[in-house]
């Protein structure tokens, strides 16, 4: 990035007043001041800013994080998280250098302060329609309609299309596989929220599940060519249908790139979930939708290896829907059935979607 002196001066004036004059900018360690713009800023070389404010001389250091893949710094939001935390924490430790402000560069190269922020928000457009889980509630009680079949085809076709976009970035793939097991929003984080010694689980059962998931992480870690565009949280509460089979998706999560199985399981786990609540197995219209979803997706995507990598992603979605926190009204036998499913899937080398009920035992 080329950092223009006038942009930096405007920014400092917004903090300290319009009387401030920026005298020089130079990279830390350089002895000759730069009176003009700085080329190539943003690659881990902090800048020393020297300014005059009335009769006083002042200085500050401007720093940013280098764009890199790996070590949890892959996304713009990762780097923002680090810098926002540093601003809030530096001043709390005795003898630590103070952070004066935290901000961002906009598309025009201007420096914008967000140092007073306490919480962040998102303003989005309004979408008309109804969340897809209302359909599943109805199907559980009344059965499936022709429109329901069309909607499943639309959903699975959409995923097949977005998953065609691939990316060659091994560190992002490894992060996705690591996160599905160890992220606070994924398997280990969800299991940490389970109560001590729940009646529907055996002692040490959660520990054994985690061990199996770690084994799957190392099994999938080298399959970097599978990295593709994903939604990241493609469940029925994040899909809104309008008329017919036209829908809009909401709340994309945990990065733009990942494993296709994450989106597939986020949706299809709910056909299992709603059916198990009623009959303790997959049956009726929900069984039809589950099988049609897989059949159409596999036909459209040609992804022959999906069924060989899907297990830990089903495990993640199963521990979510079996969670006493997220679904407090479920009976213990429903939760037990869901855990039977996830453990049997983890123990199978290739998922058999046409014989799903074998995993419920």
Image (cartoon, helix red, strand yellow):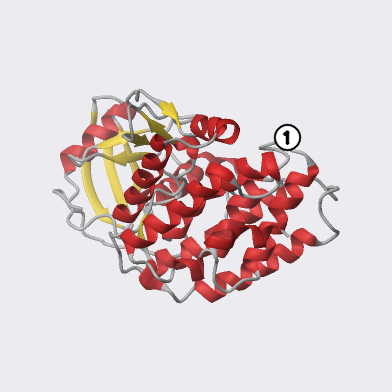
Horizontally, residue 238 falls left or right of residue 197, namely left
Q: 204 above or below 108? A: below
| In-front residue for pair 75/224 | 224
Image-quadrant location for residue 55: top left
The residue sitting at 29% across, 60% down in the picture is 164
Q: 42 above or below 222? A: above
Image coordinates for residue 119, horizontal then vertical, percent: 49, 30
Q: 304 above or below 338? A: below
Q: Residues within 10 Å of mark 1 (few under 14, many from 20)?
A: few
Horizontally, residue 13 falls left or right of residue 177, namely left
| In-front residue for pair 344/75 | 344
Image coordinates for residue 356, horizontal then vertical, percent: 60, 59
Where does label 1 land, which residue? Answer: 328
Image-quadrant location for residue 167: bottom left
Image-quadrant location for residue 92: top right
Q: 232 above or below 306? A: above
| In-front residue for pair 86/33 | 86
Q: Residue furthest left?
A: 36
Location of the C terminus (image quadrant): bottom right
Image coordinates for residue 211, horizontal then vertical, percent: 69, 68
The residue sitting at 43% across, 74% down in the picture is 223
Image coordinates for residue 231, horizontal then vertical, percent: 39, 48
The residue sitting at 40% across, 72% down in the picture is 224
Disc 1 secondary structure class: loop
Is residue 347 in view? yes
Is residue 98 in view? no
Q: How many marks?
A: 1
């Amino acid at each position: 990035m080329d950092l223009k002196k006038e942009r930096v001066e405007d920014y400092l004036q917004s903090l300290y007043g319009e009387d401030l004059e920026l005298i020089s900018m130079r990279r830390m360690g350089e002895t000759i001041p730069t009176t003009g713009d700085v080329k190539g800023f943003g690659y881990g070389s902090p800048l020393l800013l020297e300014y005059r404010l009335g009769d006083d001389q002042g200085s500050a250091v401007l720093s940013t994080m280098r764009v890199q893949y790996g070590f949890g710094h892959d996304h713009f939001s990762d780097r923002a998280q680090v810098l926002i935390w540093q601003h809030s924490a530096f001043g709390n430790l005795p003898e630590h250098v103070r952070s004066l402000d935290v901000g961002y560069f906009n598309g025009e190269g201007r420096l914008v302060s967000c140092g007073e922020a306490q919480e962040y928000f998102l303003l989005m457009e309004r979408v008309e329609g109804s969340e897809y889980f209302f359909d599943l509630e109805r199907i559980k009680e009344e059965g499936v309609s022709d429109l329901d079949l069309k909607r499943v085809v639309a959903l699975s076709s959409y995923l097949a299309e977005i998953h065609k976009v691939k990316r060659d970035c091994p560190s992002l793939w490894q992060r996705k596989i690591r996160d599905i097991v160890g992220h606070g929003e994924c398997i280990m984080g969800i299991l940490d929220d389970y109560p001590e010694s729940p009646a529907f689980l055996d002692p040490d059962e959660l520990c054994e599940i985690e061990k199996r998931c770690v084994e799957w992480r190392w099994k999938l870690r080298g399959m970097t060519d599978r990295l593709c565009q994903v939604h990241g949280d493609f469940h029925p509460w994040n899909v809104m249908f309008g008329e017919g089979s036209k829908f809009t998706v909401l709340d994309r999560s945990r990065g733009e790139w990942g494993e296709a199985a994450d989106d597939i399981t986020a949706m299809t786990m709910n056909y299992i979930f709603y059916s198990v609540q009623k009959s303790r197995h997959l049956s009726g219209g929900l069984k039809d939708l589950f099988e049609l979803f897989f059949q159409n997706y596999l036909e459209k995507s040609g992804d022959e290896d999906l069924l060989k990598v899907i297990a830990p992603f089903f495990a993640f979605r199963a521990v979510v829907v079996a969670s006493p926190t997220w679904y407090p009204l479920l009976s213990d036998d429903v939760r037990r059935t869901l855990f039977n499913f996830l453990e049997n899937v983890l123990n199978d080398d290739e998922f058999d979607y046409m014989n799903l009920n074998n995993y419920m035992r």
